[in-house]
């Protein structure tokens, strides 16, 4: 029997949506205010869902303290109060859209979890706009 456990977290970060292969006019048209050359920030909310079998000895899918520590060390310590474009190598060649941020976080966390777990990451850029990976 598989069960999903979830943990939420929060971080603040700045970014600029910009494609260097497009003109200034094209970037402004596509990304609008999010193309501000001085960046802009969000208060991101993150939900991490881990699915797996319940361990018969512990009764856990995963120890939530362990999951908390993984999220803290590998995501929050890396992303919180950072300029994603300037300070994170992951975004040196990809645009830090909510979609790309979500996939990057998923990859980071997936590398920290045992293969027996399924992982879903949901990232809220605002209370109304969110993305999840993987989908369906």
Image (cartoon, grey):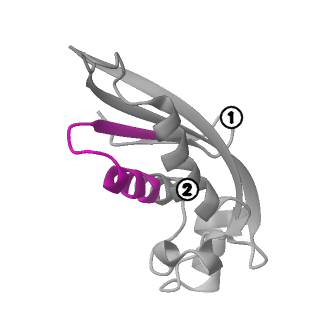
The residue segment tinted magenta is 104-121
Q: Residue at x 79, y 77 (%)?
A: 38
Q: Position of residue 55 (x, y in %)?
A: 26, 21
Residue 15 vs 106, above or below: the answer is: below
Quarter that holds the N terminus: top left
Quarter that holds the C terminus: top left
Tell me the tag on residue 127. 1
Q: Residue at x 34, y 20 (%)?
A: 58
Verify whether residue 108 appears in magenta.
yes
Q: Nearer the viewer, residue 28 or 131?
A: 131
Mark sitting earlier along the chain (1/2): 2
Relative placement, left or right, of 5 versus 72 is: left
Q: Nearer the viewer, residue 88 or 136?
A: 88
Residue reaching furthest to the front: 57
- Quarter residue 87 falls in: bottom right
The kind of secondary structure element at disc 2 is: helix
Q: Position of residue 104 (x, y in %)?
A: 43, 60
Relative placement, left or right, of 10 versus 91 is: right
Q: Are marks 1 and 2 in contact (CB under 8 Å)?
A: no
Q: Nearer the viewer, residue 42 or 74?
A: 74
Residue 89 vs 15, above or below: the answer is: below
The kind of secondary structure element at disc 1 is: loop
Binning the other alpha carbons within 10 Å of mark 1 as few (below 14), some (14 to 19) or many (20 upward) gives: few
Relative placement, left or right, of 108 versus 117 is: right
Q: Residue at x 52, y 34 (%)?
A: 65
Residue holding disc 2:
73
Residue 69 vs 111, above or below: the answer is: above
Tell me the tag on residue 1. none
């Amino acid at each position: 029997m598989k069960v999903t456990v979830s943990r939420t977290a929060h971080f603040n970060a700045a970014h600029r949506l910009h494609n260097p292969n497009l003109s200034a006019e094209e970037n402004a048209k596509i990304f609008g205010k999010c193309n501000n050359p001085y960046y802009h920030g969000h208060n991101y909310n993150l939900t991490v869902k881990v699915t797996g079998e319940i361990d018969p000895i512990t009764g856990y899918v995963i120890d939530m303290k362990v999951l908390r520590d993984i999220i803290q060390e590998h995501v929050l310590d890396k992303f919180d109060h950072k300029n994603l474009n300037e300070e994170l190598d992951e975004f040196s060649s990809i645009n830090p859209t909510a979609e790309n941020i979500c996939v990057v976080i998923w990859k980071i966390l997936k590398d920290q979890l045992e293969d027996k777990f399924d992982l879903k990451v949901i990232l809220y850029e605002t209370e109304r706009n969110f993305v999840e990976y993987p989908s369906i």
